[in-house]
Structure formats: structure tokens, C-alpha cells
Image (cartoon, coloured by chain):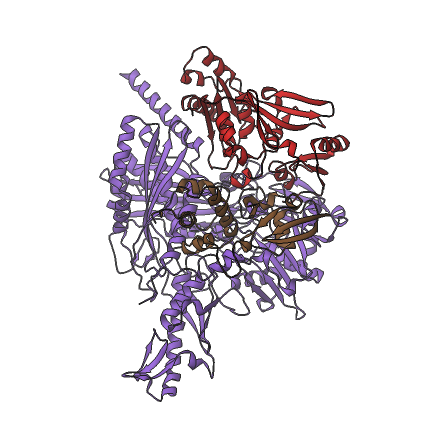
Amino acid sequence: MSILGTRVLRTEDPRFLTSGGVYTEDVTDGRLAGACHVFFVRSPIAHARIARIDLSAALAAPGVVAAFTGADLADLPRIEPMMAGFLNENMRRHLLATDVARFVGDAVAVVVTEQAYQGEDAIELVDVDYDPLPAVIDLDEALSNQVVLFDEAGTNVVVEFGNASTLRPDLFADCEVVVEHTISNQRVAPAPMEGRAAAAVWGEDGRLTTWIPNQGAQGARDGMAKMLGIEASQVRVITPDVGGAFGAKFGADPEHAVVAWVARQLGRPARWTETRFENLISMTHGRAQRHKITIGGGRDGDVRAYRLEITQDAGAYPRIGAVLPFLTIMMASGPYSIPQAEAIGVSVVTNTTPVGAYRGAGRPEATAALERAFDLFAAEIGADPAEVRRRNLLPPFTEPHQTAFGALYDSGDYVVALDKALAAAGYGELRADQAARRARGDTVQLGIGVSCYVEITGGGDEAGAPQENATVEVHPDGSATILTGTSPHGQGHSTAWAMIASEELGIPVDRFTVKWGDTDLIPEGGGTGGSRSLQQGGAAVQQASRELIELARQRAAAALEASPDDLRFDQASSSFAVAGDPEASVPLTQLAQDEPLLVQAVFTAPGATFPFGTHVAVAEVDTETGRAVLRRVVTVDDAGVVLNPLLAEGQRHGGIAQGAAQALLEEVVYDTEGNPLTASFADYPIVSATELPSFELADSQTPTSYNSLGAKGVGEAGTIGATPAVQNAIVDAVAHLGVRHVEMPATPMRIWRAIQEAQSQESQSQAARAESA
Amino acid sequence: MMRVEITVNGQPRSDDVEPRLLLVHYLREVCGLRAANVGCDTTSCGACTVLLNGESVKSCTVLTVQASGQDVVTAEGLAPPGELHPMQQAFRAEHGLQCGFCTPGMVLAAVSLLAENPKPTEQQVREGLEGNLCRCTGYHNIVRAVLAAAGQAEVTA
Amino acid sequence: MIPAPFDYVAAESAGHALELLASHGDDAKVLAGGHSLLPMMKLRLAAPQLLIDISGVTELAGVTVDGDELVIGATTRHADLAGSELVRTEAPLLAHAASLVGDPQIRHRGTIGGSLAHADPAADLPMALVALGGSVELRGPAGTRLVAADDFFTGFFETSLEPGELLTAVRVPRRQGVPWGYQKFVRRANDWAIVGVAAIAGRIALANMGPTPIRASAAEQALAGGASAAQAAELAAVGTSPGEDIHADRGYREHLARVLTRRALEHQA
């Protein structure tokens, strides 16, 4: 009986449920004894010259050990944007803002105290003189370059992906119907429940050991080394339990490097834990794209052309957010066959929090734009949104399909996903319910939203082809250890990788120890993000396990004095036996007795994989108040073969919740001066259990040939599919009142206003018709 | 400094604390019980939830001095060492935790919920957990876990 | 995230609390459940030097009947108010309002005295008290005075509590069986009301339509004059001065006040 595909409970859980996870703030290590506590002073102004910083009052406060400003760190290299050259490299950042603060939250000084409680008292005493500069918040203002954030760059443009001159003016020439709209994929906060933190200590050997919550210790190590101007070999990153990340804990942030610098400067360990306020204003934000969408086709429902023009808000210092339009463009045409499609993008800096990756990272934006465009088109021609999609979906393919945007979809059957989701939702009954409510003029109307998506997971990066390493070792006592280059933060890799290895080795799941996140133990690794882990990291575990069996086979042959070809490995008993002679057998673990039995393998994937699916959302809207309630979310998320349905469902649930939250609730809001208005969990409406229904997940598994697990990535599907489905459902609920679009998040006020405007336009048209009659 | 006498997980303790020491920090730093976490600044997230005299409270908004003479139970004390309380067992069985940061608070809030309403509906469970935020699970399996612990009919998956 | 340093004393009686208030003046604040005060102190929006904890003062606890009124001790917690058979029978609007404050953990700590003294115009209990036409007992060095709910809330987070006075009890009329309506408009369950309406016995109170909970007087007068609920509700926003924030602008709040007032009048328990 194969364990693969079964609902194995997590081996991680007992610890988390009783003593709790050990997150960075919880780490008690002898090396951190006597640690001092680091607190950041952050700019309260979005754009300002830093005229003067007076630390004297703070230095005199109880328990203050030291205080530093950017001037003290002047000999450290400035941080260049990633992919410098591709991104405008003249937008450099100091570890502590020096001369200019560029967003509310930009750290300008640190205060170090003996005890944690003394820090907040002390930072209040730091006196900073700011000379305000005009704050650039609006995207068009940023593009105009009237006020430039970086004199060195001379422009606010970080990077362009094509430009307007590459667009074909006749793209929509053969379209009977053309619809154009400018919509927002609004800025959101990743807001993992655990914020950022660090603990750092330098050894006698001059090496840094630092504990950081992260999504890949190796990348964090390299980032730390770069910021501190030292060799990567001088840095050891240890990853404690991580309380969620969602893309915002990749690499290392300037704060992590400052904490390490402080530790070196003071010759003692240093620790830092950010507050939720700091997290909401200085952890990278997500999304923040503006989309001009144009879609055209025939009245028969054929979509003939589509154009997407992206303006990406990169925030004050370019990070991976500036690059994400690349992925948005790659996925611009989604699962559809659109004869003419083009997409361009530009990323600009603004005086706001830097934008990074957030669950989906560029692909939710593509799907949201396309799915909104499809509904706008369907509304224009008076067709059913599901039927318009069905008509235009790519037909099923088993050979990889290349799109006009350069994506090579490995396998997919998009129409089946649509049909499955519609059937599971009871689409016909829902439309009947909707019609009945409309006929009665009910106050509470029903809306059904559909989204079809395909997304890219497990791609390579600028370092090369997608790959991951794993080391599997069997011990004489019957236990086993796996070292992985992935970096779970809730995904359950301890259980999942143990399942894969257990299947190969016949050792029970609970006898495995899975390790990650210590760069001295595992110097290479790609971390966890982009939904890569199972298809690369899991595949590596499987490969290493299979190679281990082959290594063991040689030893077994020697032990049994038989030819390796005559040996059979029996998974159930975890032993080798001579074919036809069960008495002549040797257990696997015995073969580890004389010398270690371990294999390190590197799995290289042929390329990225393309999971796909359809989400159907059902929402009710109170047409008197505008308040929307999400009633149902039905999904098909086909990510290939499912290793552990429990874990896969959990990933889907979490993604759906965040996706729905973006459509319904969440938005980072700045005023025109760049002051954040949603800098606490009282103001930033992170979704709670009361706003969500239980979800309905349908099963669909179209294998990929790219790895022997048949697996693609599922972690981000939820955000990609759910956001547009929920937004479309809300618009659909009030479409009969003339509403064509409601911006995200669909707040009650926005929905109500949309109804008012549509009704007033309708009255005006009626009046005009009456007059002319 | 003030003297407080608090029973923590059944063990009476006597400590000297600053009046402003929040109960969550007393539990974490003085008692060494770090399952309760601080997740926000505005009494919103519930990651710090513990039981005070059997009722769920957000320990970030209780002063240690306010808890003197009273009874605190944390996740570590819900069950004897090496065992799982039925609620903890249900969370495991239903995959109601992923990164685990919200989990101790969520479990204790759920225990308190069932103490006051032993057979809640799904809606009542969701409302009963309105003070506990989770970013990983989408709440679906958390709700299943609480309903399972209450012996209720299962939610459709 | 954590308060500035302060001293703490547990009052042994109401009189003891009053003595401490008298001697410390503005430097001291009263602490009961702490779920209005401590969040402000943690954000450093308030930094009293002394906290006087009255949660252990027995004379300030409990719910009793006094003629045609319920008398509710200031330290009565929201959870106890919501669960009290007496309150659910005699003043169900109040029990309902208490059941909606925050979340279960907050309701296990927050008190009616604290909530009323905090005087958040968007909160449930101030609005409920105004709708009910209740009153508060304020005890000071000179004795105890009674202030009607209509007079108690004087401004944005301001009440008629004088320095050195303690809110000791809350009085509400007993109205067993009298229909009441309550509408709390929120985006998330444990948010403060974007707009709230409480209605009973011809009185209509609004939350978050101005710096204090406010009576929808024009609507009340219309009702008294025989108007229907729908007609009266059209006047709900008259005389209000709603603020603007990320949730709602003025026009939308006024619209909600009208819709929710109609619903509070039409859907009564």
C-alpha cells in the first residue's frame, strides 16, 4: 500500500500544539546569553532630508547601551537593487537611511538597550530634524519625474518591460466589440502572524551566526554577506520555526544586517523583534499594480485581442516587486487562446513601503486583470461569463504548449477544470436563484463569479535552471535523516519529505528527522517560495532515496554474496532479499552499520510547471447598504499528482482566504502625503473566520512529466484563482443594476457608490430618451 | 517592583514584577512559557490568548499585577506532558495548524468557547474565534477541528 | 507596544479609590478591565503615572433591581452582562450590545464602567445607554450624583466625569417585553461600528455619527407624530456630524444611518 496520496497527519504538530513553535524571538541559545536589544527609529515622514539626529537624550535613558545612525554605518556598501543593470542600479539604499528618508517607516537610527522594555522608552527620546520634501505617492506623478526620489538615477522609472511604442495600434481592428478599463490590483500587506526578527552573535573566529525567520537560509546568508560587505563563508544563518512568510521573508532585510552590525560593534549578541506597526509599514508590501485592460472580440463571444498595460508601484527602494511585471506579462493570456495579445509594464518608485513578493507574486495580477476583462467583455455582449470563458479556453494538450508570451505550459485541461467547478457549484441552480431574486427585486442579491487560471510554479531564477538538493541518510538504529534545501514555514515538509522517503526506503514516517535552514549544514538550497518545494525539493528527496537504495544494493550484494541484479528490495520490510530465497535477506539499516549510508542528490527540473484551475465564488450583496458577504468558494486547483491531500487542501484553503481577502477587505491605504492609514490590525482588516465560509474543493490531478512525482506547485493557486472570482461575484450581484465594475477591495461604500452611479446614469439615459421621444 | 502570586498551569508562583509587565511577557520571559506569542499591538490578533480563571483573555492586554491571586493556563498546561488535550488532538487530526504561530492562542480560545457553548454551530464557532487571526489556514480546518472536538457533525470539505 | 512606566495600586474600596484620585489628580487613571485604557497606554496615547485598579472592589460589582431600574455595578464585565438572565429579561438591548463588544476575550475583561468612561462614539455600550435613556452614578468627594446618558457624553472621548470622580454604577429602565432594535454595521465581526443604531420605546441612538453617541431626534419626533418607521428613518441623519475615514465618507454614513434606523425600527426583538 503506497503512502503517497494519503492523508498522513503532520509529524510536526505535537510540538507546535503543546510547547509551541520556537520562533526567532523564542530562541534560547547559550551563544545569545547577555544579548542586547535593538530598536529602530523610523521616519514618520514619507519624504524628507534628514537634517539632524540628536541621540543625546536617548543615550542618557535607563538601560541604553548605545545608539547609532547611518553615519556610523557609512563604510558599509549601499544596497543595490537586485538584478542591477536590469533594474535601475542608481536607486541604492543605505542600511539606515542617511541624508534622505524615503518612506514612512524608513529606519534612520537604532537604539540598543539592556532589556526589551527599555527600548520603546528610549527611541521616543531620539530627536530627528526632518526637512520635508514633496512626497510622490501617485503613480502618474511618479512617472512624470517632477520630483525624483534618487538624484543619482534622475528618473523614478526602475525598469520598463516593453513600452508604448511596441504596441500595435491595429490590435483591435477586427473586433466588433472593444472594452477598455483601468483597474487597480491594490497594495496589500503580507502580514504573516510572526513579523520579522533577528538574533546575531559573532564568534571568536570572526564568523557571524544569525537566526532569522526566512524562506531560504542560503539566500538570506548571501544577502547578509552582501549587506555587511563580507564573504558568504563568514556567515551562518540558522532558521528557527517561521510563523508564516507568504513571500515577504526571502533573503534578508536591512534591519537584519543592522542587528548583526550592532552585535559586531558592541562585541555582544544582539536581538530584535519588530512590532506589528513596524511590520505593516516596513515589511515589503504586495501587489500594487495598476492595469489598463483592453479586450476585444466578436459579438459571438470570440475574444480576438487583449492588451494589458501595467504600472507597478515599486515603493521607495526597488526590490523584487519591481520585477514582478515580468511574470505578470508572461502569464498575461492565461489559459485562453487569444489570437492577438500584448502586454507591457513599467515599475516606478514612490515614497511608500518597498513592494516585494506576496503569495502569487505577479501571477495573481495577471489572472485578476484577464478575468476582469473577460467579465467586462461578457457583460458588453450580454453573454454568460462562464460560456465566454469556455469558448475561448485552450483545448486540452498533453504536449507542452508555448504561448505568445514565452511561457511553455507543460500540461493542462482547462475546459475540464471549468466544467468540474461549475458542476460542483451547481451553476445552473445558482443562476436560477439569482434570476428569482432579481425578478422579486430582493434587497439581498446573489452574484456568481468565475475565474479560470493557469499559473507558473517552480521556475528557475537568474542563477540557473530549477533545481534542488536533498541528502538522505539511513542510520543503524532504524531512523533516518533528510537534509533539504527547501525551507518550510507551515507547509509541512517534515511530513511530506518523510512520506516520499518512506515510500522508497520502507522506514516509517515517524522515524524521519527532516532538517533545513542551517547554512553550515546545508550550504546550497533554493528555499521555499514560488510553489517550488514539492516539485523540486520533494523530487530531490525521492531521487536521493532511490539512489540510496542503489548504493545499499551494492552493499547488500556484498553482504549476501549475491549479484546486485538478483536482489529485490522489499519496501514493506525495508530489506533486500535474493530473488526466490527470502531467507537470504539483509535489512536496510544494517547496511548503515559499518559506514554511513547516505546520498546527496540534486534534482534538476526541465523547467517550470503550470498548474491550473477554476474558482467559482458566490456572494450576496445587500443593495441598500452595499455590504457584500462571501457565501461559497468552489475550486478546482489542479497541481498534478497530490502527495498528501491534507497538506494540499490546507495550502488551497490558506490561499483562497488571502485571495478572497484582497477582493473583499484588505488594502494598504496611504493619504496624499504618504502617511499610512492602515498601520495596525485594528485598521488593516486582515480577514477573520467570520468573513469566510468553509470552502468546497474539488479534486483534479493532471500529472506533469517534469518530475517523477507528477507534481506541480499548489501553494499560490488560492490567491490566483480566488481574488478575481470573488471580485467578479460581487460585480455580478449588482450587474442587473447597471454596475460593470467595482474596484478592490469591494468595500460596502464602493459597492453602494457603484450602484448609485449606475442608477443615476440609467436615470439620465432614461430622461434623455424621454426627452428625445 | 511588586510581588505577584499567580498559579500558572497548576503551579503556584511568586515573583517580583514591574507594574507595566504585560502578562504575556511574564509568561514568556519569567515563566519560560513561550507558546503564547505577541502578534500585534492593538489587542486584535489573539496569538497571546491564555485562560485566566478558565476564561480566554488576551494576555497582551492584561497586566501581570492584575492576575495576582489568580489562575492562568497556557497551551503548555492544557494536558499532562506528552499528552494532547482533546482540542489539541482535534487540531492535529483536522490539520488546523500550519506555521503554528496563532495555534496556542487559537486552541485556548476554542477551549474557552466550548466551555461556554458546548455544541456550537459552524457560525457560532466562526464568531467565537473572531478574536483570533490566522494567516495560514484560511480557518477552514480550524473550524472543523473545533466542531470535531465538540462532537458535532463534520463540515463538508 | 508596551506602556510607559507607571505605579499600580489595587483599591480596597470605592472610598479608597476616591482618596487616591483626589491626591493624584490628573496623574492617575482608574483601571477595571483595562480593555479601553491599556490598548491606549500600549500605543502611548495615554501615560498615566498611577493606575488605580477597582476590579476587586465588591461594592462596584453585581447587577441588582431597584424599583423600575436595573442597577449595574461599574466593574460588570461585558460577558457577564451579555449572559445575565436578569439583564436579558429586563434590558435585552443592553445584553445584546454587550455581546457584540469586540470579541470573546475582550468581553471576558472589559467592563461597562470602563467602556462608558472611555466614551468612544463608535462603541456599543455608550450608544445602548443613550437609547435606553439610562444614567450613570458618579461618586466624588462631595457625594454621589446621577447623570442622564443624554448629558453624560460631552465630546469626543469626553464625559462629564469630573476630576476625582468615579463612575460607580449604571442605571437602566426595566423594560421587559418592550420591542427593541439594534443594528451594528461592520466589515469584520470585531470591528467598531461604521455606523450603529439602537432603538427602543421611541428613542433612537446612533453610534459613530458624531463625536458622541447621538439621538436621532428628528426621527424620534416624526415617530411620535405618527410617521411610519420608513418615513421617520429618512430623518435619521438630521443634526448629525459624521466624520470621514477609510471606511466611509460623510454621505455614506448619513445613508447608512437612514437605512439602519429603518431596520432597527422594523426588525425588533
Query: Residue, x 72% and y 34% (percent of image)?
Result: C28
Colour of chain C in the image: red
Quadrant of the image containing the N terminus of chain A:
bottom left
The residue lying toward the viewer, choosing from C23 and B43, is C23
The chain painted purple is A
x 38%, y 87%: residue: A558
Locate the C terminus of chain A by quadrant: top left
Q: Position of residue A732 (x, y in %)?
A: 33, 35
Q: Nearer the viewer, residue C86 or A423?
A: C86
Direction top: furthest residue: C225
Q: Colour of chain B?
A: brown
Name above or below for residue A332 compared with residue A140.
Answer: below
Q: Name the one closer to the observer, A222 or B94.
A: B94
Answer with left or right where residue B112 lies relative to residue A32: left
> Quadrant of residue C73 in the image?
top right
Q: x%, y% of residue A367?
A: 37, 47
Closer-to-camera residue (A555/A547): A555
Q: Position of residue A772 (x, y in %)?
A: 28, 17
Number of marks: 0
Residue at the limit of the structure toward the bottom, as seen here: A561
> In which quadrant of the rendered view does residue A237 lie?
bottom right
Q: Is residue A741 left or right of residue B128?
A: left
Q: Up-down: is A673 above or below C151? A: below
Image height of A286 relative to A200, above or below: above
Q: Is residue C13 in view?
A: yes
Residue C221 location in percent, x, y?
A: 49, 13
Res C246 seen here: no
